[in-house]
Amino acid sequence: MYRIIFPICGVLGVFLVLLLVKGVNERTVVKQEYVAKVRFTEGMRLLSKSKYFWIITIQFV
């Protein structure tokens, strides 16, 4: 009996694991107070490339 059931369970288990790995997004749990640290120059560079920043800035001039 174990020669039949174990291989079937093994194959189904591997298939289910591959199915789960393919369909699940990885998420991280962090504290609510966590703030990502970004250097000032990097933030300014990214902000200067943001079209939404420029649209809002020009709208209120």
Image (cartoon, rainbow, N blue to C red):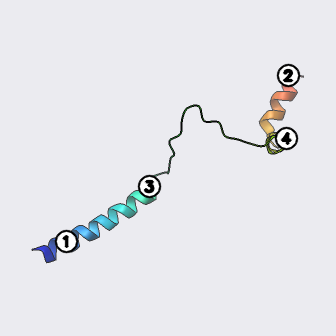
Q: Are marks 2 and 1 in contact (CB under 8 Å)?
A: no
Depicted 22 relative to depicted 46: above or below? below
Secondary structure under tag 4 reads helix
Give me the residue at 82% from left, 43% from top.
49
Residue wearing tag 2: 60
Give me the residue at 22% from left, 74% from top.
7
Q: Are marks 3 and 1 in contact (CB under 8 Å)?
A: no
Query: Which amino acid type is shown beneath numbered disc 4?
Result: Ser
At which x and y percent is residue 42? Answer: 80, 45
Distance from label 2 to label 4 (Cα)?
17 Å
Would you say 38 lies left or right of 20 here?
right
Distance from label 2 to label 3 (Cα)?
44 Å
Secondary structure under tag 1 reads helix
Mark 1 Cα within 10 Å, few/some/many (few <14, many 20+)? Answer: few
Labels 4 and 3: the sequence-earlier one: 3
Distance from label 2 to label 1 (Cα)?
69 Å
Labels 2 and 1: the sequence-earlier one: 1
Residue wearing tag 1: 6
Mark 4 Cα within 10 Å, few/some/many (few <14, many 20+)? Answer: few
At which x and y percent is residue 38? Answer: 74, 42
Give me the residue at 36% from left, 62% from top.
17
Labels 2 and 3: the sequence-earlier one: 3
Secondary structure under tag 3 reads helix
Which is more toward the observer, 3 or 52? 3
* Image mark for residue 23: 3
* Image mark for residue 48: 4
Labels 3 and 1: the sequence-earlier one: 1
